[in-house]
Amino acid sequence: MFVSRAELFDLVWSQPRTKLAIRFKVSDVALAKKCRSANIPMPPAGYWARVAAGARLSRLELPLRLPGEKDVIAVREPRYASAPTVDTGELQPPYYAESVDTLVDAAVKQLGRVLAQRDIADAHSGLARVLRKEEERRKKFAEMKWSYYKPKFDDASSQRQLRLYSAIFRALAKLGIKGAVSEEQQWKQGVGTTDRLSGSLEFGGAVVTLFFVAAEAPSKTTKLKLLVGGDTDGQAHSVWSDEPQLPLEKQLDSIVRSILVCAEDRMREHAQRSYEWALEGRERRKREREEQRLAENARLAAQAAREQQLRLDSLIAAASRRQRAVEIRALVTALKDTHPNLVGDDRFANWCSYALGEADRIDPTRSDWRELLQVTGVPAASKDLDHQ
């Protein structure tokens, strides 16, 4: 079941969430989770008890949608992967009352300053899986001294990347946005397979990827570059680099803002593509239905032509049989008239009986007329014909 943010906001402020959850056939906990993820404020604890006691309480205002969030919320996930296609009604293109900057400004105001992290001792939970695997490798390497078990991300550049990921994830977690870091391998020409860290942020209607690229600076220090929304400079939505006197740690406020802009842009791009795909799908189905209609008409026309030809062939065959029957009877009469002496001959009499029998057998006028109509494929015009 899908509702807009405004509709869900009105509903949660019109009745207790437990009753609303029954209506939507979900738990009140799941409904509260949907509201929090969509930035919808809910009545505080005790609100409905005070209303029942006669208190007149005001409700909060619905804040702006978070960047990257959809305006339509799936309160109860659809049972099937895709909803049935509906080709009625007019498709409306995506519409947004607020600009991207307006939504991002409101979100940034909720975040406040984005603080860098000095270590990863208290890292964001999105780093937990990578850090756990690193610790397992570290222990095995200490025991066995095999290079295979050597930690992959113990170098200064990787540790710095982890701190930056954690700082970004912690900041955006205030908006309910989930972030995670994973390990992946990439191929570098002349180097071979290397391991790297990749980050992703899950917004309601978009996923924003984060990749760090390390490069040696002239001073032999490692210089980092952050790609937002792509794994190459050309694909990225924005690119951030260490600058003299301005490392990435001091650019986190701007970086986080660019991530929010990227999320909203990607969500709108996806919505526009979905709208265009829906239009194309509707037109394609329209063409397919028209092609099916024309094909069916052609099939029916061909079938009617075949039936018409069969009726004509049957009619011609009936007329031919009638002509042969008339000719056979004429032959018998002519023989009797020409050879009167054969009339008393048994063999001639048997032959005449056989010939006239065959004439009657093939003569359509001697058979039931209904049989003739059935052979020619002509439907009865009226039920009264059966009584004639």
Image: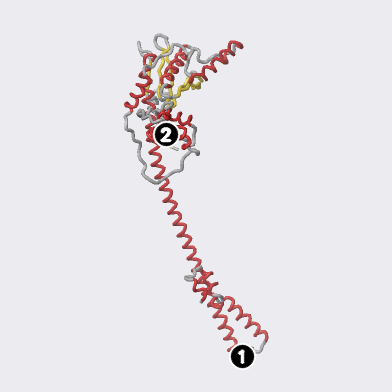
Is residue 270 in view? Answer: no
Looking at the rendered structure, the kind of residue marked 1 is: Pro
| Residue furthest to the bottom | 341
Q: Residue at x 63, y 82 (%)?
A: 353
In the rendered image, the vertical position of residue 283 relative to residue 261, given as above or below: below
Residue that carries the numbered disc 1 in the rendered image: 340
Is residue 167 in view? Answer: yes
Q: CA distance from mark 2 to mark 1?
A: 114 Å
Residue that carries the numbered disc 2 in the rendered image: 15
Q: Is residue 350 left or right of residue 5?
A: right
Residue 254 sits in quarter: top left
| Secondary structure at numbered mark 1 | helix
Residue 342 in the image: state x and y as whole percent: 64, 88
Q: Residue at x 43, y 24 (%)?
A: 176
Sequence-first disc among 2 and 1: 2
In the rendered image, the vertical position of residue 210 relative to residue 54, given as above or below: above
Q: Residue at x 46, y 16 (%)?
A: 162
**Which circle marks residue 167 in the picture?**
none
Residue 99 sits in quarter: top left
Residue 230 in the image: state x and y as whole percent: 42, 25
Q: Is residue 179 left or right of residue 57?
A: right
Residue 277 sits in quarter: top left
Looking at the rendered structure, the kind of residue marked 2 is: Gln
Residue 295 in the image: state x and y as whole percent: 45, 54
Q: 10 Å neighbourhood of mark 2: few (<14), some, or many (≥20)? A: few
